[in-house]
Image (tube, rainbow, N blue to C red):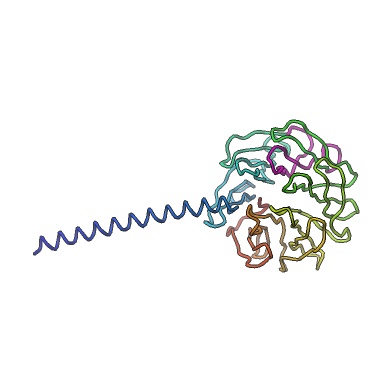
């Protein structure tokens, strides 16, 4: 009787162990499937944070809430921008003593410096085919927009204006570039052909409009503006500047909007919970939820 009970006990323990192992395997498999689905649908975002003491570039899976750093350098790293095929990240770094454009793979390796100039080079933005990078530089005295091949060659100047031109972003078709400019003594969103021609303004020059972001389907442009109440909120408009719609309504500052790759969600940074964190909402501004929970500053999503 004692032997029979012992055998039963060990069999029970064995069966429970097998069940637990199978459950672990299913959970791991499920996490991999979800992670893969998140990757293909635009579920990861690179961003800038100082949670390690100085500002570094991190990557966050917005569905699994997992984040880890891609850069580890005592110098400032910032302005991350993912390539369209999600294999490379362009960014600005002062690791050489001056803000320059660098590129690395999505694991933080294969680092390469693309620009080398005594002036400041910022705001890298990939062309849709990944062959070119537009960026902002003050190498000619004020901020203008330049473009180069993705390997740093064939540098060309796109804007040449006394006012500052910044924050370039390509249209999905690669034929146009939207940017922010101070041409009428106030920040507004402009668009130009990808060769720098046919520049025209899209937003009211009487209010500040910055940080354009073109939707993946090419139909809309996100932006930040303090046009109501001197508090920055997120808006969207048609690519010709019509039908401007307000998406966020909060007494705190909201900015730096970017689209997920599938165009279904918008990721942005906000001060609404006391310090700068990342948030996500539907493309129409509904269902806002917080993505990062850290006492440090999490910002500049891409």
Which quadrant of the view contains residue 275?
A: bottom right
Residue found at x 56% / y 50%:
39
User: Which residue of the protein is positioned furthest toward the left in this rendering?
Assistant: 1
In this view, the residue in front, 117 or 35, is: 35
Q: Is residue 49 left or right of residue 1?
A: right
Foreground residue among 94 and 172: 172
Indicate yes or no whether the magenta region holds residue 116. Answer: yes
Residue drawn at 72 percent across, 68 percent down: 249
Quadrant of the drawing holding the N terminus = bottom left
Give the total of numbered labels: 0
Whether 36 is among the magenta residues is no
**Figure check: 162 above or below 273:** above
Q: Which residues are magenta?
A: 115-143
Residue plotted at (54% across, 57% down): 63
The one of 235 and 69 positioned closer to us in this rendering? 235
Q: Position of residue 69 (x, y in %)?
A: 57, 46
- Residue 88 at x, y = what percent? 62, 40
> In the picture, residue 271 is in which quadrant?
bottom right
- Relative to 242, is 131 on the left or the right? left
Task: Using residue 52 as the reference point, say whether residue 215 is left or right of it.
Answer: right
Residue 47 percent coordinates (x, y) = 63, 50
Q: Nearer the viewer, residue 177 or 181?
A: 177
Q: Residue furthest top?
A: 153
């Amino acid at each position: 009787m004692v032997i029979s009970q012992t055998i039963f006990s060990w069999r029970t323990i064995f069966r429970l162990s097998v069940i637990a192992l199978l459950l672990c395997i299913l959970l791991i498999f499920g996490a991999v499937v979800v992670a893969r689905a998140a990757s293909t649908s635009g579920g990861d975002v690179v961003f800038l944070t100082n949670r390690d003491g100085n500002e570094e570039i991190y990557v966050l899976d917005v569905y699994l809430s997992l984040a880890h750093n891609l850069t580890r350098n005592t110098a400032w790293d910032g302005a991350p921008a993912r390539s369209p095929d999600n294999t490379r990240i362009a960014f600005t770094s002062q690791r050489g003593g001056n803000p320059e454009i660098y590129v690395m793979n999505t694991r933080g390796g294969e680092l390469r410096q693309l620009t080398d100039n005594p002036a400041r080079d910022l705001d890298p933005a990939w062309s849709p085919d990944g062959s070119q990078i537009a960026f902002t530089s003050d190498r000619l005295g004020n901020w203008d927009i330049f473009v180069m091949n993705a390997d740093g060659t064939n540098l060309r100047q796109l804007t040449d204006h006394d006012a500052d031109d910044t924050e370039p972003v390509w249209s999905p078709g690669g034929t146009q570039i939207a940017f922010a400019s101070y041409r009428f003594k106030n920040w507004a969103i402009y668009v130009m052909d990808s060769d720098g021609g046919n520049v025209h303004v899209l937003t009211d020059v009487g209010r500040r409009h910055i940080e354009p972001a073109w939707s993946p389907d090419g139909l809309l442009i996100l932006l930040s503006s303090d046009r109501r109440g001197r508090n920055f909120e997120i808006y969207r408009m048609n690519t010709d500047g019509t039908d401007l719609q307000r998406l966020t309504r909060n007494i705190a500052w909201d900015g730096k909007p970017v689209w997920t790759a599938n165009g279904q969600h918008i990721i942005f940074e906000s001060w609404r919970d006391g310090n700068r964190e990342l948030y996500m909402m539907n493309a129409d501004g509904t269902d806002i939820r917080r993505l990062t929970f850290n006492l440090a500053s999490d910002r500049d999503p891409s």
